[in-house]
Image (spheres, helix red, strand yellow):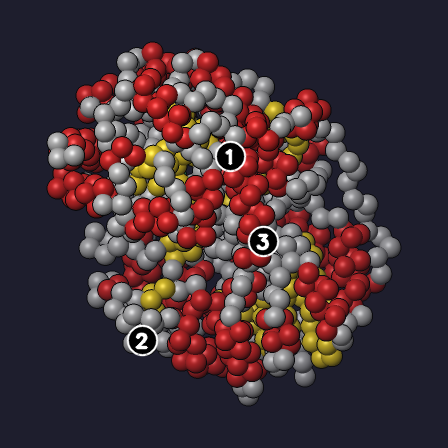
Amino acid sequence: MTTPFGQSTVLGYPRIGPDRELKRAVEAYWAGRIDAAALQETAAGLRAQVWRTLRDARLDAIPSNTFSLYDHMLDAAVTVDAIPDRFRALGLGDLDTYFAMARGTAAQPALELTKWFNTNYHYLVPEIGPSTAFAARPDKPLSEYAQARELGLSTRPVLVGPATFLLLAKPAADAPDGFRPFDRLDDLVTVYADLLAALADAGVSWVQLDEPAYVADRSPAEIDALRRAYTRLGGLRRRPRLFVATYFGELGDALPALLGTPVEAIGLDLVAGLGNLERLAASGPIPGRTIVAGLVDGHNIWRTDLRTAAERGAVLTGLADHVSVSTSCSLLHVPVDLAAEPDLDPALRERLAFARQKVDEVVLLGRALRDGVAKLPAPAGPHHWRDDTVRGRLAALRPSDTRRGPYPSRAAAQQARLGLPPLPTTTIGSFPQTASLRAARADLRAGRLSPSSYAARMRDEVAAVIALQERLGLDVLVHGEPERNDMVQYFGERLGGFAATVNGWVQSYGSRCVRPPIIYGDVTRPAPMTVEWSSYAQSLTRKPVKGMLTGPVTILAWSFVRTDQPLTDTANQVALALRDETHDLEAAGIQVIQVDEPALRELLPLRAADQKAYLDWAVESFRLATSGVADSTQIHTHLCYSEFGEVLSAIDTLDADVTSIEASRSRMEILDDLRAAGYARGIGPGVYDIHSPRVPDQAELTAALRLALAAVPSERLWVNPDCGLKTRGYEEVEPALTNLVAAAAEVRTTL
Ligand code: GLN
Ligand code: ZN
């Protein structure tokens, strides 16, 4: 007897809890305030709450094992026993080994953290070598399945698929050159066979294996390996039925490959990967399969146009034996419940759907597909958040508005004005966000501190940060960003067309959650946003103070963005607001302005064919934001958090006068890459890693600078850390910057 898949499902659900209960519990455990049993009790409670929510919404296929104490890739590594020896050797219990891999210990750095596809979620990168001894450790999926059984629910355990697991892993430190984790696919599939057998023995009827890595460009060999893996798993005698889920885009050639295997169900993203529909239609009927149609956007917060979605679903009904409706990806990427946002503008609110509301949409669509589409509600009408002034200004822009004068004349004008020494020293913007600053912000929110006392407190902080930098002898100062909760949220709260939520938390990594603003309408700048802070800071010193802005691409990347117009239009609207801000900063006497774009790499499309168009508009919006100033005003940008391989030439076309870039971990290799890409302006390769509490000594910084000087002429080299200092304490920052200034001075004498 076979169990049908069900009519509606979600690929995953937020696990942080409606009130970030998970964050509080894990942080309490790390701090020793609660024990492991209390942590597990909270975790079990959160899982049960999700399952009940899904059941009460009448979702008929409910997933399990989508919960995680930290990260689902880390869970996957544990499930196949891919625990690097360096963590096993710590001799900790299971839970503490798990957290050691996630967070590191005094003796062992954590696994690398990196972005999950094109989302703002970050996963821990498994380290796989030729000798990694994979073994099935199904405890977590089994116990979650059993817990749901006790609630009367027969769930579908979700696992990261073996191919995606290895494609996202990195070679262990001791792996020989040329080794790829993916080389171990056959061994890993053997272990997945054991996992599937264990699940089948426990009574599991469907399992979900996530293979999103196949929506990116994959070689024919990688696609063939996918086919072989699922042919093998599909051929097992003792196994649950297999649902291979894909998301974040189009499967391309991997779709026919998967269809050629015995898997019973395939999940397709029909929001970010609408082309999947055509591809499937072109390949003709697919007997004996379930298609799980990802019709509800799991990656954004807008309500679904249910009628259009149902029409798409209906196309599939003619092709597959069974069509089930799901979210386009896990709901991990959206906030939990719109019910927690009673104060949002009702006209906006009625256009939104958070995770809980998206479940209702999936259920409705599932019924509509089964019973006909008659009763679906109409889509929301056109909105009225237009600003014709902004649209008019953008339409009137000429190409010259996004071009500055030639770099050599800019550089000369800036040097004449700023008179900086060779190898100028600076920082990336933020100074430590101390407990006292955070307390002041909490007091402001709670009404315990008046806005004017809060502002006075922040001004004191700026004055202290300026005094410290003067004392340390830095050349280009910053105001320290004490007033900013977050580099995007701060601007979102000050721009028109943006809405902030009070409880719209989304997991970024581990216990860290963010609250992305919502860009719902045309973007305006009702008033200057940063000028008061920068001019106050500048009034305290004769040295130049850098104005500090977040760039248009990063603002988009870390917000929920409207989908009723191309991203490029929204980016240009944000850029125009920033252009007005740079203009006002310049008029207020600010001579150096930094526009941060740490997320430049983040929005890069997963498929190479789409990347150029993205980079073109991304660069153009940055230039729009930064080209309205005089040649003598120095524009900086800052980039971090990623491998810059695919965006090197875009970094050049940003045309910033100075680019500071994360470099210390890659030992300055980025400098050669940038030069090869044609970059020949000011460059500040980070000389030390601010993600670690370690204080670099002078010799180490001097060595980093000498290494940089081998690739960059001294007239263009700047000296700065890898990134902002907000996560560090003053006890680390002061000695580190003292050494940085001393190292620059030492190297200057040898020029
Ligand atoms: N100016 C910001 C800071 O220093 C840049 C942060 C970032 O790159 N993520 O905090
Ligand atoms: Zn940074």
Give the residue at x 87% y 55%: 374
Give the residue at x 50% y 19%: 583
Q: Quadrant of the C terminus?
A: top left
Q: Amino acid at mark 3?
A: Asp
Q: Residue 112 appears in which quarter of the rendering? A: bottom left
Judged by depth in the image, the label closer to the viewer, 2 or 1, is: 1
Q: Is residue 636 above or below residue 506?
A: above
Instruction: Confirm or deny contact between disc 3 and disc 2 (CB under 8 A).
Output: no
Q: Quadrant of the N terminus?
A: bottom right
Q: In the structure shown, which secondary structural element does the residue marked by tag 3 occupy? A: helix
Q: Earlier in the sequence, mark 3 or mark 2?
A: 2
Please say whether residue 88 is visible from this viewpoint: no
Give the residue at x 30% y 51%: 669
Q: Earlier in the sequence, mark 2 or mark 1?
A: 2
| Disc 3: which residue | 610
Q: Earlier in the sequence, mark 3 or mark 1?
A: 3
Q: Amino acid at mark 2?
A: Pro
| Disc 1: which residue | 622
Q: Amino acid at mark 1?
A: Phe
| Disc 2: which residue | 130
